[in-house]
Amino acid sequence: MADPNPARTFADPEDPIIAATVPDHYTPLLDGDPPAGENSRRPLKGFLVILSGLVLVGLLMALIGENGPSVSQDSQQNDLTLNAPAESTNISAQFLEPASRGPSAGVSEKSFRLHSGVRAPFPWSNTMLTWQRTGYHFQPEKNWMNDPNGPMFYGGWYHFFYQYNPDAAVWGNIVWGHAVSKDLIEWLHLPLAMVADQWYDTNGVWTGSATLLSDGQVIMLYTGATNESVQVQNLAYPADLSDPLLVDWVKYPGNPVLVPPPGIDDRDFRDPTTAWYWPDGKWRIAIGSKVNKTGISLVYNTEDFKKYELIEGVLHAVPGTGMWECVDLYPVSLKEDNGLDTSFNGPGVKHVLKASLDDDKNDYYAIGTYSLESGNWTPDNSNLDVGIGLRYDYGKFYASKTFYDQNKQRRILWGWIGETDGESADIKKGWASVQSIPRTVVFDKKTGTNILQWPVAEIKSLRKSSKKFDKLEVGPGSVVTLEVEKATQMDITAEFEIDKEALKRIGESDVEYSCGTSGGSAQRGELGPFGLLLLADEGRCEQTPVYFYVAKGTDGQLKTFFCTDESRSSLANDVDKRIFGSTVPVIKGEKLSMRILVDHSIIESFAQGGRTCITSRVYPTKAIYGAAQLYVFNNATSASITASIQTWAMKSAYIRPYSSHQES
Ligand code: DQQ
């Protein structure tokens, strides 16, 4: 790891962070009084001036349309040309909208509310619900989980913390769950790291990030929802740094270390980032917020993580994007394949800024420059600014966080993958949410305009029997069965080539195409869609197509879309079924390629080496267990495709309590 400050030490020997190196056990601290003085509110002078300028831009965006930042994702029930007609569940409609969870407490909506209105309940059987649990994605043993928190590599272990409700399968009573792993795949659950036992976090130990200091200390900053539901930032640290499992955590007695500054609403101040080291000898952190409808990221500097100074202006602001949750800022190398420590800056480096948009529940990123002079971050392309341009994932993926893995010199991204079924089903099955497979993140040197996300290499350790389907010719309007061992738990790679003659022959086609609004996999065009049908039953009443669709402009240029169509993923009516995706850059000479991880109710898809990603939660009722099948399809009208596919059945990962690991 780059050492940004080799000489740095804490001056005060009584410093509780230093004291924390002495083995000790965590005992809940007595309630403290809200601090006065050092963290008192400072005006946001410079920023408010900048903001007035941004209001103009905001007005412009409002004119462009209220759907500005979001991709259209109509939920549609299509009459798929390739399939048997959808069965009706014949259940009379009832109003099932679940209770709202989150906004009244001051955070984004956590209960899943169907995008296309209320639906009739489906009679879920235990067999169906049991099938939905994943085999190799991170999940607690039971109950609700949301955001990834404070990931890091420490003491030879990967540590993963997460937002957790120990009491129920719905959001509420949020504390920090904790698990450790040697390889990011097999996990051991540890006791809760932090519970809501102080006035400054009694309404929730919310999201936060870890910073590893060069002298070995571990700093954890997190948002607490106080007894009055004010969002404050708190400091915690391990009780015993010699314990590689970091089981016990101490909350700093002087908490909270930060309260909302003037001009910022008490409920719009959350999710501190990992700190980065600045040439002035101080650390900096960013915190998400908003002013009116402008999403912003505030920046503070600190020397000791206890006293902070608000930096005038903001790191960045984008009008019309609303509250920014879970901001992340990190460098990516323009030349090397390795990841970079969060403090790294200089030539050959760009910075990715990410915000999770409370308003539309999607994670948006942009690539830009973080100036060491001005302290501002500027996007390379203002049309692709944070919240209005690229998304990490065009499916279900939110509140993500990266960390620098100094063990393998890579940057790793985790995302919270929520449920898209009804809350009553979650309560019945006793759990809700999974985490994405951790993904490495690098700058895409070929395009120069996006990042590449890819499942960590360790996932390959779960691969078992493999099948290869080499150069399959799939004619227009056909579906071919792929005989595989375990269609519900797979790793798949696939490459597609479109018939070159057809590509030449066809004139302009589908220039207005969009994954969300162009009829999904049922809509036939000259050059698509084609791809794989996942979690499909034999009659294909249920199926989830993941596919490419190629459009051709009048200038002969091709534009490729990568989409997932959930509209026939389940016969159940009380789950959300959307069609989503986006364009994917394809460089001349490249084949169209996809990688797909199927793990029961989650499908993670990566196109062109991870340029565009789509994560789906699907809840089939028939295409489960041994009844699930895999197909390759080509629904184009004119072009044949050649598909080369490799599949691996995946083992389940060893994810269990630490205690059972000790016994075995
Ligand atoms: N989840 C946390 C908040 C964060 C939100 C609360 C994002 O800190 O803003 O569970 O999902």
Image: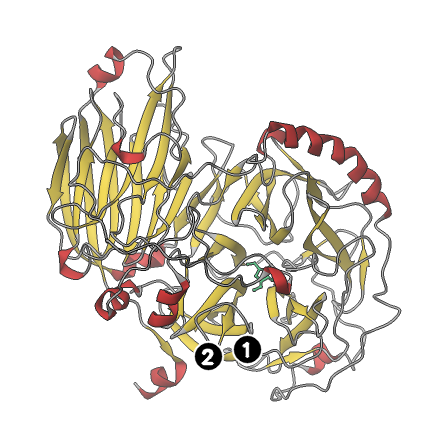
Q: Do the residues under discs 2 and 1 have CB atoms within 8 angstroms?
A: yes
| 537 vs 47, nearest the viewer | 537
Which mark is on residue 193?
1
Name above or below for residue 507 compared with residue 142.
above
At numbered mark 2, what does the secondary structure look like: helix, strand or loop? strand
Front residue (pair 168, 248): 168
Displayed-image quarter of ligand 1:
bottom right
Q: Classify mark 2: residues with Cα within 10 Å, few (<14), some (14-19) or many (20+).
A: some
Q: Amino acid at mark 2?
A: Leu
Q: Label 2, label 1: how many angstroms apart (C-alpha)?
A: 8 Å
The image quadrant that residue 549 belongs to is: top left
Q: Residue furthest right?
A: 37
- Taking the spot 41% from the left edge, 53% from the top edge, the residue there is 118
Task: Tell me where residue 612 appears, x and y as whole percent.
Answer: 41, 39
Label 1 neighbour load within 10 Å: few <14, some 14-19, many 20+: some
Asked if 272 appears above or below 482 in the picture, the reply is below
Q: Is residue 172 left or right of residue 222?
A: left
Q: Which mark is residue 116?
A: none
* Secondary structure beneath label 1: strand
Disc 2 residue lies near ligand 1 with CB under 8 A? no
Quarter of the image with the N terminus in it: bottom right
Quadrant including the C terminus: bottom left
| Amino acid marked by disc 1 | Ala
Is residue 363 visible to us here? yes
At horizontal 14% and vertical 56% (from top left) the residue drawn is 627
Residue, disc 2:
190
Q: Is residue 338 above or below residue 243?
A: above
- Residue drawn at 28 percent across, 37 percent down: 78
Q: Is residue 441 left or right of residue 89?
A: right
